Image: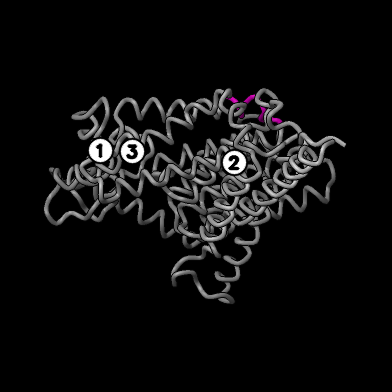
Amino acid sequence: MSVPKDWQAFKKMKGDTLLYFVFVLVFFFMSLGTTLVTIFGILSLYVWLFAGKIKGLRFIARNSWFWPVLVFMVLPWVGLLYTPNLSGVGIDYAGKSHYWLYTITVASISFAVFPPERLIQAFLAGLALNAVVAIYQFAGFVPLTRGYEYRGFGEGYGVLSVFLIVGILSASYYFGKAAEKKIKVLLSLLILLYFFHLIIMQGRAGYVTFVLLSPLIVHNLFRKIGFLKILLACVCLLSLMSLSPIVRERVRLSIDQLEHHVHAEGDGAWGKEYTKHQDRFFMWYGAIPIFLENPFLGVGTGGYQTAMKQRGKPGDPDMAHPHNNLLHMAVSYGIVGIIAYLWLFVEIIRNAWEQRETPVGFFVLSAAIVVFVSGLFNTTILDVGTLFLLAVAVGLQQAFPKFVSAGNMHVEAKP
Protein backbone atom coordinates (compact mmCIF):
# COMPACT_ATOMS: atom_id res chain seq x y z
CA MET A 1 0.00 0.00 0.00
CA SER A 2 1.01 3.56 -0.52
CA VAL A 3 1.45 5.63 2.62
CA PRO A 4 -1.70 7.78 2.06
CA LYS A 5 -3.89 4.71 1.46
CA ASP A 6 -2.37 2.90 4.41
CA TRP A 7 -3.07 5.90 6.64
CA GLN A 8 -6.69 6.07 5.47
CA ALA A 9 -7.19 2.37 6.16
CA PHE A 10 -5.62 2.73 9.62
CA LYS A 11 -7.81 5.75 10.33
CA LYS A 12 -10.92 3.84 9.33
CA MET A 13 -10.02 0.86 11.52
CA LYS A 14 -9.45 3.15 14.49
CA GLY A 15 -12.69 4.98 13.75
CA ASP A 16 -14.68 1.73 13.57
CA THR A 17 -13.21 0.52 16.86
CA LEU A 18 -13.77 3.82 18.65
CA LEU A 19 -17.34 4.14 17.36
CA TYR A 20 -18.18 0.65 18.60
CA PHE A 21 -16.76 1.17 22.09
CA VAL A 22 -18.41 4.57 22.39
CA PHE A 23 -21.73 2.82 21.84
CA VAL A 24 -20.85 0.13 24.36
CA LEU A 25 -20.62 2.99 26.85
CA VAL A 26 -23.82 4.57 25.50
CA PHE A 27 -25.76 1.36 26.12
CA PHE A 28 -24.18 0.86 29.55
CA PHE A 29 -24.97 4.37 30.79
CA MET A 30 -28.41 4.61 29.18
CA SER A 31 -30.27 3.76 32.39
CA LEU A 32 -27.89 5.70 34.64
CA GLY A 33 -29.15 9.19 33.82
CA THR A 34 -28.94 11.44 30.80
CA THR A 35 -25.66 13.27 31.35
CA LEU A 36 -23.11 10.61 30.46
CA VAL A 37 -25.22 8.97 27.77
CA THR A 38 -25.67 12.36 26.10
CA ILE A 39 -21.92 13.04 26.24
CA PHE A 40 -21.08 9.69 24.66
CA GLY A 41 -23.89 10.09 22.15
CA ILE A 42 -22.43 13.39 20.98
CA LEU A 43 -18.97 11.79 20.93
CA SER A 44 -20.34 9.12 18.58
CA LEU A 45 -21.35 11.87 16.14
CA TYR A 46 -17.83 13.32 16.19
CA VAL A 47 -16.28 9.90 15.63
CA TRP A 48 -18.77 9.19 12.85
CA LEU A 49 -17.84 12.41 11.08
CA PHE A 50 -14.07 12.41 11.54
CA ALA A 51 -13.67 8.71 10.78
CA GLY A 52 -15.35 9.22 7.43
CA LYS A 53 -18.33 7.00 8.30
CA ILE A 54 -20.60 9.52 6.61
CA LYS A 55 -19.68 7.83 3.34
CA GLY A 56 -21.65 4.78 4.43
CA LEU A 57 -24.85 6.83 4.65
CA ARG A 58 -25.64 5.94 1.04
CA PHE A 59 -25.85 2.25 2.04
CA ILE A 60 -28.01 2.98 5.10
CA ALA A 61 -30.38 5.16 3.05
CA ARG A 62 -31.22 2.18 0.83
CA ASN A 63 -32.90 0.35 3.69
CA SER A 64 -36.65 0.45 4.28
CA TRP A 65 -36.33 1.40 7.96
CA PHE A 66 -34.41 4.58 7.12
CA TRP A 67 -37.31 6.44 5.50
CA PRO A 68 -39.72 6.64 8.45
CA VAL A 69 -36.74 7.74 10.54
CA LEU A 70 -36.07 10.53 8.05
CA VAL A 71 -39.71 11.60 8.30
CA PHE A 72 -39.44 11.71 12.11
CA MET A 73 -36.34 13.90 11.79
CA VAL A 74 -37.95 16.36 9.36
CA LEU A 75 -41.57 16.50 10.53
CA PRO A 76 -40.98 18.46 13.78
CA TRP A 77 -39.15 21.19 11.83
CA VAL A 78 -41.92 21.40 9.25
CA GLY A 79 -44.39 21.67 12.13
CA LEU A 80 -42.59 24.80 13.35
CA LEU A 81 -43.76 26.62 10.22
CA TYR A 82 -47.36 26.73 11.47
CA THR A 83 -47.19 26.16 15.22
CA PRO A 84 -48.68 28.82 17.53
CA ASN A 85 -46.03 27.92 20.12
CA LEU A 86 -42.77 28.53 18.27
CA SER A 87 -40.84 30.12 21.12
CA GLY A 88 -42.13 27.71 23.77
CA VAL A 89 -42.09 23.93 23.68
CA GLY A 90 -42.23 23.95 19.87
CA ILE A 91 -38.55 24.62 19.31
CA ASP A 92 -37.67 22.30 22.21
CA TYR A 93 -39.58 19.39 20.63
CA ALA A 94 -38.07 20.07 17.23
CA GLY A 95 -34.60 20.05 18.77
CA LYS A 96 -35.20 16.52 20.06
CA SER A 97 -35.19 15.26 16.48
CA HIS A 98 -31.38 15.24 16.73
CA TYR A 99 -31.64 12.01 18.73
CA TRP A 100 -32.47 10.25 15.46
CA LEU A 101 -28.93 11.00 14.33
CA TYR A 102 -27.83 8.30 16.78
CA THR A 103 -29.87 5.87 14.70
CA ILE A 104 -27.51 6.57 11.83
CA THR A 105 -24.31 6.47 13.88
CA VAL A 106 -25.11 3.13 15.54
CA ALA A 107 -26.13 1.74 12.15
CA SER A 108 -22.68 2.72 10.86
CA ILE A 109 -20.90 0.23 13.13
CA SER A 110 -19.16 -2.58 11.26
CA PHE A 111 -21.30 -5.34 12.73
CA ALA A 112 -19.44 -8.14 10.92
CA VAL A 113 -16.35 -7.19 12.94
CA PHE A 114 -17.96 -5.98 16.17
CA PRO A 115 -20.80 -8.11 17.61
CA PRO A 116 -23.99 -6.11 18.27
CA GLU A 117 -24.88 -8.48 21.11
CA ARG A 118 -22.22 -6.81 23.28
CA LEU A 119 -24.27 -3.61 23.15
CA ILE A 120 -27.29 -5.43 24.54
CA GLN A 121 -25.19 -6.98 27.29
CA ALA A 122 -23.80 -3.53 28.17
CA PHE A 123 -27.39 -2.25 28.47
CA LEU A 124 -28.33 -5.12 30.78
CA ALA A 125 -25.22 -4.57 32.90
CA GLY A 126 -25.90 -0.86 33.34
CA LEU A 127 -29.54 -1.55 34.15
CA ALA A 128 -28.48 -4.10 36.78
CA LEU A 129 -26.05 -1.64 38.38
CA ASN A 130 -28.76 1.00 38.60
CA ALA A 131 -31.23 -1.50 40.08
CA VAL A 132 -28.70 -2.47 42.78
CA VAL A 133 -28.28 1.20 43.73
CA ALA A 134 -32.08 1.58 43.83
CA ILE A 135 -32.35 -1.41 46.18
CA TYR A 136 -29.73 0.16 48.46
CA GLN A 137 -31.90 3.29 48.44
CA PHE A 138 -34.93 1.17 49.30
CA ALA A 139 -32.99 -0.36 52.20
CA GLY A 140 -31.96 3.10 53.42
CA PHE A 141 -28.24 2.75 52.77
CA VAL A 142 -28.12 5.32 49.95
CA PRO A 143 -29.96 8.68 49.86
CA LEU A 144 -33.03 8.86 47.67
CA THR A 145 -32.79 10.57 44.30
CA ARG A 146 -34.64 13.88 44.56
CA GLY A 147 -35.85 12.77 47.97
CA TYR A 148 -38.76 10.51 47.03
CA GLU A 149 -37.99 7.90 44.39
CA TYR A 150 -36.01 4.65 44.33
CA ARG A 151 -34.53 5.25 40.90
CA GLY A 152 -30.80 4.74 41.45
CA PHE A 153 -28.91 7.13 39.19
CA GLY A 154 -31.74 7.18 36.65
CA GLU A 155 -34.19 9.89 35.71
CA GLY A 156 -37.98 9.52 35.93
CA TYR A 157 -39.79 6.32 36.81
CA GLY A 158 -41.60 6.44 33.46
CA VAL A 159 -38.33 6.09 31.55
CA LEU A 160 -36.82 3.57 33.96
CA SER A 161 -39.94 1.41 33.80
CA VAL A 162 -39.51 1.12 30.04
CA PHE A 163 -35.84 0.20 30.43
CA LEU A 164 -36.61 -2.40 33.11
CA ILE A 165 -39.33 -4.10 31.07
CA VAL A 166 -37.04 -4.22 28.03
CA GLY A 167 -34.38 -5.67 30.34
CA ILE A 168 -36.77 -8.31 31.71
CA LEU A 169 -37.82 -9.31 28.19
CA SER A 170 -34.22 -9.53 26.98
CA ALA A 171 -33.09 -11.51 30.03
CA SER A 172 -36.06 -13.86 29.62
CA TYR A 173 -35.00 -14.43 26.00
CA TYR A 174 -31.48 -15.39 27.12
CA PHE A 175 -32.97 -17.63 29.83
CA GLY A 176 -35.01 -19.51 27.25
CA LYS A 177 -31.96 -20.03 25.05
CA ALA A 178 -29.49 -20.90 27.82
CA ALA A 179 -28.33 -24.51 28.12
CA GLU A 180 -26.24 -24.38 31.32
CA LYS A 181 -28.02 -24.45 34.66
CA LYS A 182 -25.73 -21.87 36.27
CA ILE A 183 -26.45 -19.43 33.43
CA LYS A 184 -30.17 -19.92 33.97
CA VAL A 185 -29.75 -19.25 37.69
CA LEU A 186 -27.85 -16.01 37.01
CA LEU A 187 -30.47 -14.89 34.50
CA SER A 188 -33.24 -15.72 36.96
CA LEU A 189 -31.58 -13.49 39.55
CA LEU A 190 -31.19 -10.74 36.96
CA ILE A 191 -34.89 -10.90 36.07
CA LEU A 192 -35.84 -10.79 39.76
CA LEU A 193 -33.54 -7.80 40.26
CA TYR A 194 -35.21 -5.87 37.42
CA PHE A 195 -38.67 -6.94 38.59
CA PHE A 196 -38.02 -5.81 42.16
CA HIS A 197 -36.81 -2.42 40.95
CA LEU A 198 -39.93 -2.06 38.81
CA ILE A 199 -42.33 -2.68 41.69
CA ILE A 200 -40.62 -0.30 44.13
CA MET A 201 -41.16 2.63 41.76
CA GLN A 202 -44.41 4.54 41.33
CA GLY A 203 -44.87 4.16 37.58
CA ARG A 204 -48.43 2.93 37.01
CA ALA A 205 -47.90 2.99 33.25
CA GLY A 206 -44.96 0.66 33.84
CA TYR A 207 -47.15 -1.73 35.83
CA VAL A 208 -49.77 -1.86 33.08
CA THR A 209 -47.14 -2.28 30.35
CA PHE A 210 -45.54 -5.13 32.30
CA VAL A 211 -48.89 -6.86 32.80
CA LEU A 212 -49.80 -6.55 29.12
CA LEU A 213 -46.44 -8.00 28.04
CA SER A 214 -46.17 -10.62 30.80
CA PRO A 215 -47.40 -13.45 28.50
CA LEU A 216 -44.39 -12.85 26.25
CA ILE A 217 -42.06 -12.96 29.27
CA VAL A 218 -43.61 -16.23 30.49
CA HIS A 219 -43.41 -17.72 27.00
CA ASN A 220 -39.69 -16.95 26.89
CA LEU A 221 -39.10 -18.51 30.29
CA PHE A 222 -41.15 -21.65 29.67
CA ARG A 223 -41.34 -22.14 25.94
CA LYS A 224 -43.16 -25.48 25.97
CA ILE A 225 -46.10 -24.69 28.27
CA GLY A 226 -49.60 -24.14 26.91
CA PHE A 227 -51.82 -21.08 26.82
CA LEU A 228 -53.69 -21.79 30.06
CA LYS A 229 -50.46 -22.32 31.99
CA ILE A 230 -49.12 -19.04 30.59
CA LEU A 231 -52.21 -17.26 31.90
CA LEU A 232 -51.78 -18.93 35.29
CA ALA A 233 -48.14 -17.84 35.42
CA CYS A 234 -49.20 -14.26 34.56
CA VAL A 235 -51.63 -14.33 37.49
CA CYS A 236 -48.76 -15.44 39.71
CA LEU A 237 -46.72 -12.45 38.49
CA LEU A 238 -49.62 -10.16 39.37
CA SER A 239 -49.68 -11.67 42.83
CA LEU A 240 -45.97 -11.02 43.23
CA MET A 241 -46.47 -7.40 42.17
CA SER A 242 -49.18 -6.97 44.80
CA LEU A 243 -46.65 -7.82 47.52
CA SER A 244 -45.13 -4.38 47.01
CA PRO A 245 -46.75 -1.71 49.23
CA ILE A 246 -45.88 0.88 46.61
CA VAL A 247 -47.79 -1.04 43.93
CA ARG A 248 -50.78 -1.48 46.27
CA GLU A 249 -50.78 2.23 47.06
CA ARG A 250 -50.68 3.22 43.38
CA VAL A 251 -53.43 0.71 42.51
CA ARG A 252 -55.62 2.10 45.29
CA LEU A 253 -55.05 5.61 43.96
CA SER A 254 -56.08 4.48 40.47
CA ILE A 255 -59.25 2.86 41.84
CA ASP A 256 -60.12 6.03 43.77
CA GLN A 257 -59.61 8.15 40.67
CA LEU A 258 -61.75 5.86 38.52
CA GLU A 259 -64.51 5.84 41.16
CA HIS A 260 -64.48 9.64 41.11
CA HIS A 261 -65.15 9.69 37.37
CA VAL A 262 -67.78 6.94 37.58
CA HIS A 263 -69.78 8.95 40.13
CA ALA A 264 -68.98 12.47 38.87
CA GLU A 265 -71.70 14.44 37.13
CA GLY A 266 -71.63 16.60 34.02
CA ASP A 267 -68.31 17.99 32.84
CA GLY A 268 -66.49 16.70 35.90
CA ALA A 269 -66.20 13.18 34.50
CA TRP A 270 -63.67 11.53 32.16
CA GLY A 271 -61.61 14.57 31.29
CA LYS A 272 -64.25 16.98 30.05
CA GLU A 273 -62.74 19.51 32.42
CA TYR A 274 -59.50 19.51 34.39
CA THR A 275 -59.45 17.70 37.72
CA LYS A 276 -56.67 16.40 39.92
CA HIS A 277 -58.33 12.99 39.72
CA GLN A 278 -56.24 11.64 36.83
CA ASP A 279 -55.30 14.56 34.60
CA ARG A 280 -54.48 12.19 31.73
CA PHE A 281 -58.20 11.89 31.00
CA PHE A 282 -58.25 15.66 30.49
CA MET A 283 -55.20 15.51 28.21
CA TRP A 284 -56.64 12.67 26.11
CA TYR A 285 -60.14 14.07 25.93
CA GLY A 286 -58.84 17.48 24.84
CA ALA A 287 -56.58 16.06 22.14
CA ILE A 288 -59.42 14.49 20.14
CA PRO A 289 -61.32 17.69 19.18
CA ILE A 290 -58.02 19.46 18.46
CA PHE A 291 -57.19 16.75 15.95
CA LEU A 292 -60.69 16.75 14.45
CA GLU A 293 -60.49 20.50 13.91
CA ASN A 294 -57.04 20.18 12.28
CA PRO A 295 -57.13 16.68 10.74
CA PHE A 296 -54.60 17.01 7.92
CA LEU A 297 -51.54 18.76 9.39
CA GLY A 298 -52.46 19.23 13.05
CA VAL A 299 -51.58 22.34 15.05
CA GLY A 300 -47.82 22.09 14.58
CA THR A 301 -44.91 21.14 16.79
CA GLY A 302 -45.79 22.02 20.39
CA GLY A 303 -49.11 23.55 19.31
CA TYR A 304 -51.08 21.22 21.58
CA GLN A 305 -50.13 23.28 24.65
CA THR A 306 -51.54 26.50 23.19
CA ALA A 307 -54.65 24.78 21.81
CA MET A 308 -55.42 23.24 25.20
CA LYS A 309 -54.95 26.58 26.92
CA GLN A 310 -57.43 28.17 24.54
CA ARG A 311 -60.00 25.42 25.12
CA GLY A 312 -59.65 25.20 28.90
CA LYS A 313 -60.33 27.48 31.83
CA PRO A 314 -57.93 30.26 32.90
CA GLY A 315 -56.82 28.36 36.00
CA ASP A 316 -56.02 25.10 34.21
CA PRO A 317 -52.34 24.06 34.32
CA ASP A 318 -50.29 23.93 31.13
CA MET A 319 -50.42 20.62 29.29
CA ALA A 320 -47.30 20.31 27.14
CA HIS A 321 -48.35 17.10 25.40
CA PRO A 322 -51.22 14.58 25.63
CA HIS A 323 -49.25 11.77 27.33
CA ASN A 324 -49.96 9.44 24.43
CA ASN A 325 -47.69 8.96 21.42
CA LEU A 326 -50.42 8.54 18.83
CA LEU A 327 -52.45 11.48 20.10
CA HIS A 328 -49.29 13.61 20.15
CA MET A 329 -48.57 12.80 16.51
CA ALA A 330 -52.23 13.33 15.58
CA VAL A 331 -52.65 16.74 17.19
CA SER A 332 -49.21 17.94 16.10
CA TYR A 333 -49.14 16.72 12.49
CA GLY A 334 -52.61 15.39 11.73
CA ILE A 335 -53.11 12.36 9.52
CA VAL A 336 -49.54 12.79 8.28
CA GLY A 337 -48.29 12.30 11.83
CA ILE A 338 -50.45 9.22 12.41
CA ILE A 339 -49.16 7.63 9.20
CA ALA A 340 -45.54 8.46 10.11
CA TYR A 341 -45.93 6.99 13.59
CA LEU A 342 -47.53 3.75 12.44
CA TRP A 343 -45.09 3.45 9.54
CA LEU A 344 -42.11 3.62 11.91
CA PHE A 345 -43.37 1.01 14.37
CA VAL A 346 -44.82 -1.35 11.78
CA GLU A 347 -41.48 -1.31 9.96
CA ILE A 348 -39.44 -1.95 13.11
CA ILE A 349 -41.69 -4.70 14.47
CA ARG A 350 -41.96 -6.42 11.08
CA ASN A 351 -38.19 -6.49 10.62
CA ALA A 352 -37.47 -7.49 14.22
CA TRP A 353 -40.12 -10.21 14.20
CA GLU A 354 -38.24 -11.96 11.40
CA GLN A 355 -35.14 -11.94 13.64
CA ARG A 356 -36.90 -12.65 16.95
CA GLU A 357 -34.88 -15.83 17.52
CA THR A 358 -31.65 -13.82 17.59
CA PRO A 359 -30.49 -11.70 20.55
CA VAL A 360 -30.38 -8.47 18.54
CA GLY A 361 -33.67 -9.12 16.80
CA PHE A 362 -35.46 -9.83 20.06
CA PHE A 363 -33.94 -6.78 21.75
CA VAL A 364 -35.11 -4.49 18.92
CA LEU A 365 -38.54 -6.14 19.00
CA SER A 366 -38.74 -5.70 22.79
CA ALA A 367 -37.71 -2.04 22.67
CA ALA A 368 -40.24 -1.26 19.93
CA ILE A 369 -43.14 -3.07 21.62
CA VAL A 370 -42.44 -1.66 25.09
CA VAL A 371 -42.09 1.92 23.80
CA PHE A 372 -45.28 1.48 21.75
CA VAL A 373 -47.36 0.00 24.59
CA SER A 374 -46.01 2.42 27.19
CA GLY A 375 -46.73 5.16 24.66
CA LEU A 376 -50.44 4.59 25.26
CA PHE A 377 -49.99 6.29 28.64
CA ASN A 378 -46.90 8.50 28.15
CA THR A 379 -45.40 10.41 25.24
CA THR A 380 -42.35 8.17 25.12
CA ILE A 381 -41.18 9.63 21.80
CA LEU A 382 -40.58 12.93 23.62
CA ASP A 383 -38.94 11.63 26.81
CA VAL A 384 -35.18 11.79 26.29
CA GLY A 385 -34.41 8.36 27.74
CA THR A 386 -37.05 6.39 25.86
CA LEU A 387 -36.46 8.34 22.66
CA PHE A 388 -32.75 7.55 22.89
CA LEU A 389 -33.50 3.85 23.42
CA LEU A 390 -35.88 3.77 20.46
CA ALA A 391 -33.44 5.62 18.20
CA VAL A 392 -30.51 3.27 18.84
CA ALA A 393 -32.76 0.19 18.69
CA VAL A 394 -33.93 1.28 15.24
CA GLY A 395 -30.29 1.65 14.17
CA LEU A 396 -29.50 -1.88 15.38
CA GLN A 397 -31.68 -3.16 12.55
CA GLN A 398 -28.63 -2.62 10.35
CA ALA A 399 -27.20 -5.75 11.99
CA PHE A 400 -30.03 -7.86 10.52
CA PRO A 401 -28.93 -10.01 7.55
CA LYS A 402 -31.45 -8.39 5.19
CA PHE A 403 -29.85 -4.98 5.78
CA VAL A 404 -26.21 -6.01 5.76
CA SER A 405 -24.28 -4.18 3.06
CA ALA A 406 -20.71 -3.73 1.96
CA GLY A 407 -20.86 -0.35 3.62
CA ASN A 408 -20.93 -1.75 7.14
CA MET A 409 -19.84 -5.35 6.84
CA HIS A 410 -16.10 -4.99 6.99
CA VAL A 411 -13.25 -2.67 7.64
CA GLU A 412 -11.68 -1.77 4.36
CA ALA A 413 -8.14 -2.20 5.56
CA LYS A 414 -6.00 -4.79 3.82
CA PRO A 415 -2.47 -5.86 4.57
| Residue at left offset 59%, top offset 43% | 49
- Return the disc, 3 or 2, that comes first in the chain's sequence: 2
Pointer 3: what residue? 328
Q: Disc 3 vs disc 2: Cβ atoms closer than 8 Å?
A: no
Q: Disc 3 vs disc 1: Cβ atoms closer than 8 Å?
A: yes
- Quadrant of the rendered image containing residue 357: top right
Q: Residues within 10 Å of mark 2 (few under 14, many from 20)?
A: many
Q: Please, what secondary structure does the residue beneath circle 3 have?
A: helix
Left or right of 277 in this view: 245: right
Q: Please, what secondary structure does the residue beneath circle 1 have?
A: helix
Pointer 2: what residue? 105
Q: Position of residue 71 (x, y in %)?
A: 43, 30
What secondary structure prevails in the magenta region?
Answer: helix
**Foreground residue, 242 or 333?**
333
> Looking at the image, is 218 positioned above or below residue 238?
above
| Residue at left offset 49%, top offset 30% | 345
> Looking at the image, is 35 positioned above or below residue 142?
above
| Residue 394: in magenta span | no
The C terminus: image quadrant: top right
Q: Which residues are magenta?
A: 350-357
| Residue at left offset 69%, top offset 32% | 408
